[in-house]
Image (tube, rainbow, N blue to C red):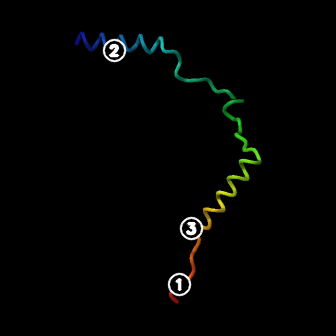
Amino acid sequence: VAKKKKKVEKGKKESATAGPTRQPFDRERDLLVSRVDPLKRRAIIERSKQLSSKFAHGGQKFL
C-alpha cells in the first residue's frame, strides 16, 4: 500500500511540473482556413481525373 501511495504522489509531482496539457482557445489559430494555392489545386484536380478513369465502367464486353 505504501508503494502505491509513493507511486501516485510521484505521478502527481511529475504531472504538475510537466506544464499545462490543455491550450486555451485561440480564435485566429483555430479558425484559420487552410488555403490551397492554385498550383496545388490544379495538381489535385489532375490526380482526381486519373482516378475516374481507373474506376469507370468498362462497358459490355460479351454482349
Q: Secondary structure at mark 3?
A: loop
Check disc 3 and report the residue beneath it: 55
**What number is the disc on residue 11?**
none
Of circles 3 and 2, the one toward us is 3
Residue 24 vs 15, above or below: the answer is: below
Q: Is residue 61 above or below residue 1?
A: below
Q: CA distance from mark 1 to mark 2?
A: 71 Å
Vertical comparison of 24 with 33: above or below? above
Q: Relative to 8, is 21 on the left or the right?
A: right
Give the residue type at disc 2: Val
Q: Of the residues shown, which amino acid type is indicated by label 1?
A: Lys
Give percent across and percent down for residue 23.
Answer: 59, 23
Q: Are marks 3 and 2 in contact (CB under 8 Å)?
A: no
Residue 18 lies left or right of residue 52; in this view the side is left
Which residue is denoted by mark 2 in the rendering?
A: 8
Kindly identify which residue carries mark 1: 61
Percent x, y for residue 26?
A: 67, 27
Residue at the outermost right position: 38
Marks 1 and 2, the one that precedes in the sequence: 2
Task: Point out the tag, 3 or 2, that comes first from the N-terminus.
Answer: 2
Q: Residue at x 33, y 14 (%)?
A: 8
Q: Amino acid at mark 3?
A: Phe
C-alpha separation, residue under disc 3 versus residue under disc 1: 16 Å
Q: Is residue 23 above or below residue 56?
A: above
* Horizontal relation, residue 36 to residue 20: left or right: right
